[in-house]
Image: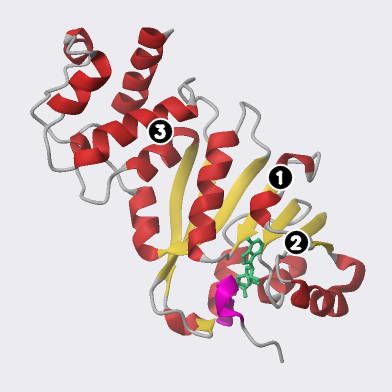
Amino acid sequence: MIKAKKSLGQNFLIDKNILKKIVNSTKIENKSILEIGPGTGNLTSYILSQKPREITVIEKDSNLIKYLRDIFGEKINIINKDILKVDETLLSKEKLTVFGNLPYNISTEILCKWILSLKDNFWFDYLILMFQKEVADRIISKSNSTNYGRISILANWKLKIKKICDIKPSSFSPRPKIDSSLLIFTPKYNFYKINAHNLEFITRTFFSHRRKMLKKPYNKIFNGNLDISKKYKIDLNLRPQNLDFDTYYKLTKEYENLIK
Ligand code: SAH
């Protein structure tokens, strides 16, 4: 028996219906698969049953490596590393389908890292990742809702996002304290050509005071020049959550023109 390590966020999926739902969320047959945080291989078995062309797993816990090798032998490529330290673009020549039931904090960190480092050529065609439900709700939310914020704007910039399902603590062993959600991300090839760090700067400035009017952060960024707010018909008495995705991308573009 493998004893779950709390420090590595080990909550193993044991619910067969959920495992089936995960592998049915996208086509696996003949695809190159990357699984991050395979743990004891519960999801790995389900993925293998769908006949992928190849599967690589990245697991940080060295104690699990021998265990995985004993079960799966040569059927999987195993990399014993921290996913945050891997250059994912070097893993395969094919576009990858990625599955990850990682610790919640790592899911968010890796998603942001990937979005920030993405070039025009996407190295994946599907990302299927588990999040704490509350964070997933923020990632998928649209303007004019209380959950809308920096991570929704960043994620929706380059990715189409859909929720596959919510997952109860009882589907895991040991049980986590909170609900989870599984999201599926696919590339948006026609995303706004802006710099990721500028987009981060713009959203950070606008969302530094969620409840305050747009006036102050706007004036800070555009030095009190109202031309851009007029051009996009932005009412500066609104709050940051009232501006839709596109407006944030356009404002970033205008900011880039200004500092060029
Ligand atoms: N996917 C499995 C295990 C989930 S538990 C299942 O659903 O049953 C999360 C797994 O991620 C654990 O095996 C843990 O060791 C691994 N992990 C945690 N941090 C990691 C990191 N930074 N890089 C790679 N794997 C990590």
Counting other residues with Cα less than 10 Å from the Cα at mark 3, is it few (<14), some (14-19), or many (20 or more)?
Answer: some
| Amino acid type indicated by mark 2 | Val
Give left or right: position of 112 versus 221.
right
Q: CA distance from mark 1 to mark 2?
A: 12 Å
CB contact under 8 Å: marks 3 and 1: no
| Amino acid type indicated by mark 3 | Glu
Residue labelled with disc 1: 88
Which quarter of the image is occupied by the C terminus?
Answer: top left
Q: Could you say where residue 27 lies in the image, as x and y percent from the top left?
A: 66, 54
Say the numbered circle drawn on residue 10: none
Say if 117 sits above or below 18 in the image. Answer: above
Residue drawn at x 46%, y 62% is 131
Residue drawn at x 58%, y 42% is 114
Which quarter of the image is occupied by the N terminus?
Answer: bottom right
Q: Which residue lies most toward the left here?
A: 237
Say if the magenta span includes residue 225. Answer: no
Say the numbered circle drawn on residue 57: 2
